[in-house]
Amino acid sequence: MAVPSLRAFRASLDLREEAMTAFIRARGVGLEVPYYVQPERQGGSWLGTLLSAATARPRRHFATLLDEITFDIEEGDRVALIGSNGAGKTTLLRVLTGAFRPTRGSLDVYGSRQALLNLSLGFNAEGTLHENIYLRATAMGIPAAKVRGLVDSILDFSELGHLANRRLLTLSSGQRMRLGFAISTSVQHDIMLLDEWFGAGDISFVRKARERLVSRVEGSKIVVVASHNTDLAKKLCNRGLVIRQGHVAFLGPIKDALSEYKRISEADRAARRAAAMAADGEGGGQSSVVGRSD
């Protein structure tokens, strides 16, 4: 019986890997982070207060950023993360990228990930552009051997080839953004994670960047994007995941998700108005009228 060669065996593994689907599976995912509170000293002299502040041990507390997050995202899904500011959208994206590790539950992600959350991640301001391409690309998990073949195309796309040997700190914020975007989108991945749609920079570069981003989105097996742009969500996504105070409030078709988010937002606004009116009532509800009453 013929034994397959090592090359043939590796080729068969590559084919099997390509055939496998990408997916994201979260089960009861939670994220808690510690924070510290300095004990307050009531009364006493200013010297006592100063000494107390210098010697008191801060108390550790925990804030729950995500709680009981459960969902399945399969190949072909384009999912919009929908929620108000501070709801947990960006935090969830960072968990999906692997930047934050869940403190509870389980998260399984199959497929290479491409994250456009922080375009300056992995940069060293003292290094040259050429050096920073290697730094950020390797931080993204791209092998150094592959990075060598990408350097010229990255510099060309960012339109910064003439500055390749200058230190990063000499560039403007817009030029750094262009370099970061060019590196981040230089390779196609299975899963794309976006925090808002790219739209910064000069008009000519934004147009080029959007064309590349559309190409990368179309080539991705899964896309997860956090956005407040409902028109973009309807156009780009087929599913919506509504996050409210770190919990999954809804997961389903994008139109239904947007409707549910609108309903939740209106209910929250009504609750805040009612709470404000109740607080005013507890304050006595008195008002002074200036003028004469006939």
Image: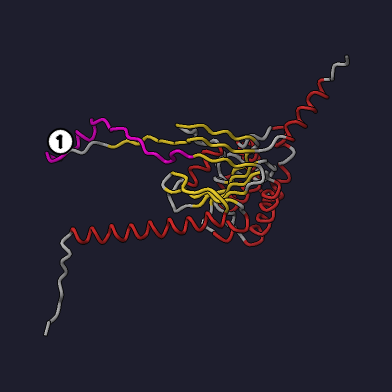
Instruction: Let me know if residue 162 appears in the view.
Output: no
Q: Position of residue 19 (x, y in %)?
A: 74, 35
Tell which of 92 and 119 is nearer to you.
92
Q: Which residues are magenta?
A: 42-69
- Residue under numbered circle 1: 48
Instruction: Let me know if residue 73 appears in the view.
Output: yes
Residue depicted at x 48% and y 33%: 102
Residue depicted at x 15% and y 77%: 290
47 in magenta: yes
Q: Quadrant of the C terminus?
A: bottom left
| Residue 96 quadrant | top right
Q: Position of residue 198 (x, y in %)?
A: 59, 54
What is the residue that sits farthest to the right in this orientation?
A: 2
Q: Quadrant of the N terminus?
A: top right
Tell which of 241 and 123 is nearer to you.
241
Residue depicted at x 44% and y 52%: 85
Q: Is 180 located above or below residue 3 in the figure?
A: below
